[in-house]
């Protein structure tokens, strides 16, 4: 069995607006961290509202770690001339849980498909270059329920294994919520199963 992948790269926060100009056409780039597909539409609407005279708002997004979900949208530009070049940059930077969008305001001179691909790719690249890229780790949360008499062994185990306590209620019946990295989840269950009166979920 391969090791669980539980770390991924994304951006710390939404980017500032990045402007790229090509033959009087303007390309405004944006990047946003996203948690689900539902986040995409409101962000695209926001960009359209900010640039009401934009001819196209093209974008790409990716979610997940092992089972990747992605979408690229050309918004009326020639097929694969905008969304895929943007998505290519998301792949090149090895990012996920991210949306990159480019609003294009046509300047009167046609760029041709090659020119469009280059302009959308360059804008996406400059936008991602302007972002702070961070590594995040998937966390799994467990609730531990145990008797007060077991507190020493439970707390010692948590400390030794450097698990993070999210909340605790220490009375006759104790309850502690801990978070561990996704890849340590199975091992955590095994460790606590060894304490007789403890329940873990």
Image (cartoon, helix red, strand yellow):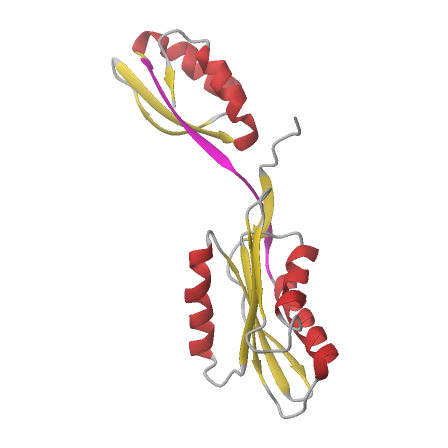
Q: For this view, does 22 lie left or right of residue 36? A: right
Q: For this view, does 138 lie left or right of residue 21? A: left
Q: Quadrant of the N terminus?
A: top right
Question: Does residue 66 appear anywhere in the picture?
Answer: yes
Q: Is residue 133 magenta?
A: yes
Question: Does residue 161 appear anywhere in the picture?
Answer: no
Q: Residue at x 58, y 44 (%)?
A: 65
Q: Is residue 177 magenta?
A: no
- Which SS does the magenta portion mostly show? strand
| Magenta region, residue range | 131-146
Residue farthest to the left, as pictured: 172
Residue farthest to the front, as pictured: 79
Q: Quadrant of the C terminus?
A: top left
Quadrant in which residue 118 is drawn: bottom right
Q: Residue at x 39, y 6 (%)?
A: 196
Quadrant in which residue 114 is drawn: bottom right
Q: For this view, does 57 lie left or right of residue 38? A: right
Residue 198 percent location from the top left of the image: 37, 13
Number of numbered callouts drawn: 0
Seen from the viewer's position, the closer of residues 152 and 121 is: 121
Residue 110 percent location from the top left of the image: 68, 88
Q: Residue at x 47, y 51 (%)?
A: 35
Q: Residue at x 55, y 56 (%)?
A: 98
Residue 94 percent location from the top left of the image: 66, 52
**128 shown above or below 52:** above
Residue farthest to the bottom, as pictured: 108
Residue 178 percent location from the top left of the image: 42, 27
**78 shown above or below 163:** below
């Amino acid at each position: 069995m391969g090791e669980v992948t539980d770390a991924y790269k994304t951006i710390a926060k939404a980017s500032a607006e990045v402007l790229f100009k090509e033959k009087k056409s303007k390309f405004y780039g944006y990047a946003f961290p996203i948690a689900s597909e539902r986040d995409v539409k409101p962000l695209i609407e926001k960009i359209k509202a900010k640039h009401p005279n934009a001819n196209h708002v093209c974008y790409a997004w990716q979610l997940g770690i092992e089972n990747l979900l992605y979408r690229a949208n050309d918004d009326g530009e020639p097929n694969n001339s905008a969304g895929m070049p943007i998505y290519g940059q998301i792949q090149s930077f090895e990012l996920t849980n991210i949306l990159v969008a480019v609003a294009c305001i046509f300047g009167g001179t046609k760029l041709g498909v090659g020119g469009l691909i280059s302009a959308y790719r360059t804008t996406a690249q400059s936008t991602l270059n302007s972002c702070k890229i961070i590594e995040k780790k998937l966390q799994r949360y467990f609730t531990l329920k145990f008797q007060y008499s077991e507190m020493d062994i439970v707390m010692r185990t948590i400390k030794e294994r450097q698990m993070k306590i999210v909340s605790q209620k220490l009375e006759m019946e104790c309850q502690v919520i801990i978070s561990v990295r996704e890849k340590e989840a199975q091992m955590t269950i095994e460790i606590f199963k060894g304490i007789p009166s403890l329940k873990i979920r």
